[in-house]
Image: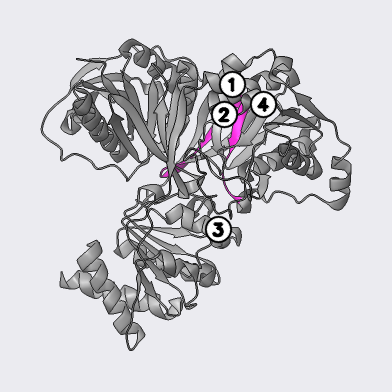
Amino acid sequence: MGKSVCVIAEFRGGDFRRVSYEVASEGRRIADVLGSNLCAIAVGSGVSAKAADLGAYGVDKVYAADDPSLEYYVADTYVPVIADIVKKLDPAVVILPASVDGKDLGARLAARLDASLAQDCIQISVDGGAIKAKRPIFAGKALAWCQWEGSSLPIISCRPNVLDCLAPTDKKAEVEKADAAVPAARAKIVGLDLDTSGKVELTEAGVIVSGGRGMKGPEGFPMLEELAKLLGGAVGASRSAVDAGWRPHADQVGQTGKVVNPNLYIAVGISGAIQHLAGMGSSKYVVAINKDAEAPIFAKSDLGVIEDLFDFIPALTEEVKKMKSAS
Amino acid sequence: MNIVVLLKQTPDTESVIRIAGDNKSVVTDDLKWVLNPYDEYAVEVALRLKEKHGGTVAVLSWGPNRVVEAMRTALAMGADTGVLIDDPALEGADILGVAKALAAATKELNPDIVLCGSRAVDYDLAQRGATVAEFLGWPHIALAVSLESDGSKVTAQRPIEGGTLTIESTLPALVTIGGSQAIWNPRYASLPGIMKAKKKPLAMKKLSDLGLNASECGAQAIKMRMATLEMPPQRAAGRIVDGPDTASKAKEVVRELHEKVKVI
């Protein structure tokens, strides 16, 4: 059996984040192709109690670094702990989530290990025994297949919401406690403001309702909030809506905002500037609502509605309610 | 407070990207080059720190001579000096190689804080800041949407999924800037600023000036390459919903979402 495949699971608030299961599932697929074991590195406060659960997604063995000082990711504590475990494991490939923390961890970890990171990948494959990974460049205007030279260690972060999760089994993974000597952090967390409203994060949302310049102001957005909530989704915004101060920057979808890939993207009053299209182009199904029949967004949509959004959104919301109460 | 801002010149975000004949690179002939927007925010943050604490703002970049234009933009905004690592050996280098060169040039400038964009809008690596910080052996804070410093430490807010963290670091430190145009409102270069920028010192460096050579950070040192590029799959032309009135169109959209997308 060759070198193992290694995934890094993200643990927060007492549980693994869903993207951890996505990378574990992808790791399992790669391990099966290579005929190797799948191990996981799990870091967090209280993580050892949950570590065995990763077995449900194909992990054979988990190295758990459990320490109260590891409750949240900071590079100063996570990077040395994880780098030590990776060095000991000497894996064939390291796969981690391209979450906010994962992207930062991957970058600093790669530099420490003198290895190359392919960031925010959407596909991994094995070609003649060699790992390759596909990632969007120019916010998805093009895609690049990355390949590693000679014996250098591939580190791959995977974009949330893209890779399929395996159906969980009742298998438990073997857990080994990693002796984590956690160094003191120079950059440390001094404040936490966690949103407990249960709002869905844009990059992880299955449905996104986005508003643009056509919203004419912040007043119309509660209407989109209501529709998004009915659909179990999140509200996004175009750059012009954010630049105008109608929505927070965290909601911005596009090349200078977030790149999203929901199952359903509803573009409301968004004309479809190229920098916006780059941010939502990989959505699985796109509905555009715009009163301008010439809006470029229609060419990038599966379904287009030429209507005044202030008339149409309430009507759509009404129909969604009817459908939901009927089913 | 001595501040260094790491800059990259990138194609404008309105650019249409085409793949070159080699299938490994993009066509650059007709691109409009700009200062990477996130790096522009970093310049703004640096200028605000200088206004508060005094000191200097040096901008540091790498690449061919065309990058001078992006550096002049930052100088026109108010940065004091520039260093451009213009060495053909860096062509085809990977982020590890570029970061080694940037770290070496940063050390010579001996700053209290280094700022840069959280990512560049071309290859979206989101690795430059963390990698340079690692090579400097410094702490870093990524994706700042606010930044304050009293001269001995730096405090920044970092949005994560479902919340915002406030992170404090000792100096020297590197901070990468996230957020958006609306958060930072980077200042425009004034006409006098543009005139002055032409006279501001801009030093050109080779790898050898930094005590480095091509075999450790040039193209032959790369560990990963973009083997092939491809265009994303094109969405088949969609359909415009037809109907006598708003309500019937809404009904049709919901039917489609229910039957095809299965979200309702």
| Label 1 to label 3: alpha-carbon separation | 37 Å
| Label 1 to label 4: alpha-carbon separation | 9 Å
Question: Label 3: chain?
Answer: A
Residue beneath label 2, please?
B92
- Identity, as a three-letter code, of the amino acid under mark 1: Gly
User: Do discs 1 and 3 share a chain?
Assistant: no
- Identity, as a three-letter code, of the amino acid under mark 3: Arg
| Label 3 to label 4: alpha-carbon separation | 36 Å
N-term-proximal mark, 2 vs 1: 2
Furthest residue in direction front, as rendered: B21
Q: Say which residue appears at 29% left-offset and 33% top-offset.
A: A125
First to last magenta residue range: B160-180
User: Do discs 4 and 2 share a chain?
Assistant: yes
Q: How crowded is mark 1: few (under 14 residues within 10 Å), some or many (20 or more)?
A: many
Furthest residue in direction left, as rendered: A170
Q: Do the residues labelled 2 and 3 touch (CB within 8 Å)?
A: no
Q: How crowded is mark 3: few (under 14 residues within 10 Å), some or many (20 or more)?
A: many
**Is B53 positioned to the left or the right of A103 in the image?**
right
- Give the mark count: 4
Q: Do the residues labelled 1 and 4 touch (CB within 8 Å)?
A: no
Residue beneath label 1, please?
B218
Question: Label 4: chain?
Answer: B
Q: Say which residue appears at 52% left-offset and 31% top-offset.
A: B127
